[in-house]
Amino acid sequence: MASSGIETEQEPLLGDRTPGSREWDIIETEEHYKSRWISIRVLYLTMFLSSIGFSIVIMSIWPYLQKIDQTADASFLGWVIASFSLGQMVASPVLGLWSNYRPRKEPLIVSIFISVAANCLYAYVHVPASHNKYYMLVARGLVGIGAGNVAVVRSYIAGATSLQERISSMANTSACQALGFILGPVFQTCFALIGEKGVTWDIIKLQINMYTAPVLLGAFLGVLNIILILTLLREHRVDDSGRQCKSVNFEEGADEVQFPQGNIDQVAVVASNVLFFVVLFIFALFETIVTPLTMDMYAWTREQAVLYGGIILAALGVEAIIILMGIKLLSKKIGERAILLGGLIIIWVGFFIFLPWGNQFPKIQWEDLHNNSIPNITFGEIIITLWKSSREDHNEGPTGCPIEQAWCFYIPMIHLAQFLTAAVLIGVGYPSCNVMSYTLYSKILGPKPQGVYMGWLTASGSAARILGPVFITQVYTSWGPRWAFSLVCGIVALTIMLLGVVYKRLVAFSVRHGRIQE
C-alpha cells in the first residue's frame, strides 16, 4: 500500500531494534510521522481548551448567578459548580466507547459542539423571565459533558504513541491541562475590565459583559478547535513498539500490524483507577481549603484571601508545568512507578506538615457576626467569599477564626511558613502522581482501543473533584484542620500501601506478555 510505513519505497524516518532482533521494529515515513504528531498537538490544544472551559468562569459564577436570579443561594451554587464534573463523569465512558468503534473525530467534534452550544446558552441565561438559575445549571452541566472528550484525547494519544514516546506526550498533555487552569482565571480578570453593564446587541438580545465575554471567547475557541480537528486530525494507531496498527478508527483503511493477543490485567486497571481518584481527590480538597484556611488562620480579609490564594495557586500551576517537563527526563532513569511512589510520599509529607503544632492559636472573631461573615463555610460558600468583598462596603467585618467553629479555641494555628512549605511539596507531588498514574494506565491497557477504559479513568477523576471539596469542607468546619489533615494523611498512607501491593503488576501490556523487555 502506497501509504504504508512498511511496504513503501520511501525511506523510513524512525527505526529502532528490539534486542536480539534483525528487523526494524519502528518504521515510519516522514509523512506519517508529521501527520501523527500534528494530530497529537491538535489534541494538546483540545485538552487546553477543555481546562479553560472549567476555569474561565469559576470566579464569576456566583455574582452572575445572583444577578440573573435572586432566589439562588449558596447550596444551589454548589450544584452549579458540581454540575460540570457530574456532566463529565457521565459523558466520559460514553464518548470513550464511541471512540472505540468510530473515527475519533466524531465524538470530539460532537462534544466540542456541545460545549460551544452550552457556552452560548450561558451567555443567554439572563433572557428567560424566570428559573434562570436552572438554565445556568444546565449550561454548566453541558459544558461538563463536552469536557468528557478528555477521555477520547487521552485514548488517542495513548494509541498514537509508542512506549518510548508515551511519558513525554502524557506530560505535555498534563502541562496543557495545567496551563488551561492557570490562564482561565487570568482571562476572566482581563474581561472584568468590561464591567457588569458592558454592551448589548439588542437585535439578538446578547449582552457582552464581564460575565458573558469569557464564555463567548470559549465558544469562539471551540469553533476554531472544530476547524482544526476537521482539517488536521488524522486517525493513527501504533503498537507499543511504534509500528502502525489497523483499527476501526482508520478512515482510509490502512493496516499493517494486527493487535497482539493477551488479556489486560484487570487488577492493575482497578488499582490505577483508585490511584488516579485519590490523586485528584487530594488536590481538589487542597484547592478548596486554601481560602477558608487562610482566612481562619491568618485573619485575612476576603479580599486578601482571594488575592494571596490566587497568587499561591497560580505559582503552584507554574511549578506543576516545570515539574511535568522535568518528569520526562527523570522517568527515563528511574521509571514511572518509582516517580508515582515518590510523588505520593511527598504529598503525604506535605499534609503531615499541615498538621497544627505548638501553642499559638488563631485569632478569634469575638465580634458579633454579620451578614458579611462566613460562620460555616460550605462548598458553595467558598466561591461566594471570592466575590462578596467587591459587592459590599469597605468594612470587611470581623476577621479570624469564626466563634461557631469550636475547634478555634483549642487547635493551634498553622504558621504561614508551615502552610507555604506544605503547599510547595503538594505542588511537586500532585503533577508527578497525576501524569504517572494515567501514563501507567495507558501502558497497562496496551495497544488495543482504550476509549472505554480512559472514559472510566476520567469519570473517576470527575468523581474525585466532586467528593474532595465536600469531604474537606465538612470535616474542616466541624472538627478543624488537625482531624481534616490527619484523615488526608491516612488516605494517602493507605494509597501508598495499595501501590506497594500492586507495584509489580503496574507494567506495560507488552512487557507483561514478554514482547518487550522493561
Image (cartoon, rainbow, N blue to C red):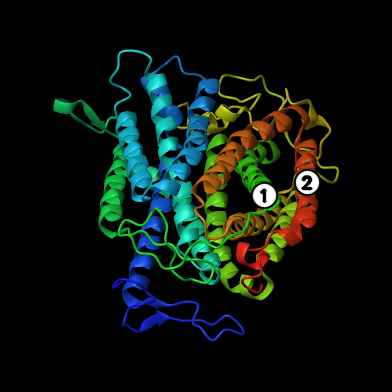
Residue shown at 73% from the left, 24% from the top: 403
| Relative to 215, residue 407 above or below | above
Residue shown at 69% from the left, 72% from the top: 334
Question: In the rendered view of the protein, which quadrant contains the C terminus?
Answer: bottom right
Q: Quadrant of residue 288?
A: top right
**Local crowd size for mark 2, using a 10 Å CA cut-off: few (<14), some (14–19), many (≥20):** many
Q: Which comes before the other along the chain, label 1 or label 2?
A: 1
Q: How many marks?
A: 2
Q: Position of residue 449 (x, y in %)?
A: 49, 53
Q: Secondary structure at mark 1?
A: helix
Residue at image mark 2: 489
Question: Mark on residue 266?
Answer: 1
Cβ atoms under marks 1 and 2 closer than 8 Å: no
Q: Position of residue 255 (x, y in %)?
A: 39, 65
Query: 483 or 439, which lies in front?
Result: 439
Q: Amino acid at mark 2?
A: Cys
Query: 387 or 341, which lies in front?
Result: 341
Q: Amino acid at mark 1?
A: Gln
In the figure, is residue 163 to the left or right of 52?
right
Q: Position of residue 405 (x, y in %)?
A: 74, 26
| Relative to 133, residue 450 above or below | below
**Local crowd size for mark 1, using a 10 Å CA cut-off: few (<14), some (14–19), many (≥20):** few
Query: Separation of disc 1 and disc 2 at Cα?
Result: 27 Å
Residue shown at 38% from the left, 50% from the top: 104
Q: Position of residue 66 (x, y in %)?
A: 42, 22
| Residue at the extreme left | 203
Q: Quadrant of residue 235?
A: bottom left
Q: Quadrant of residue 147?
A: top left
Residue 193 seen in render: no
| Relative to 149, residue 232 above or below | below
Query: 398 or 285, which lies in front?
Result: 285
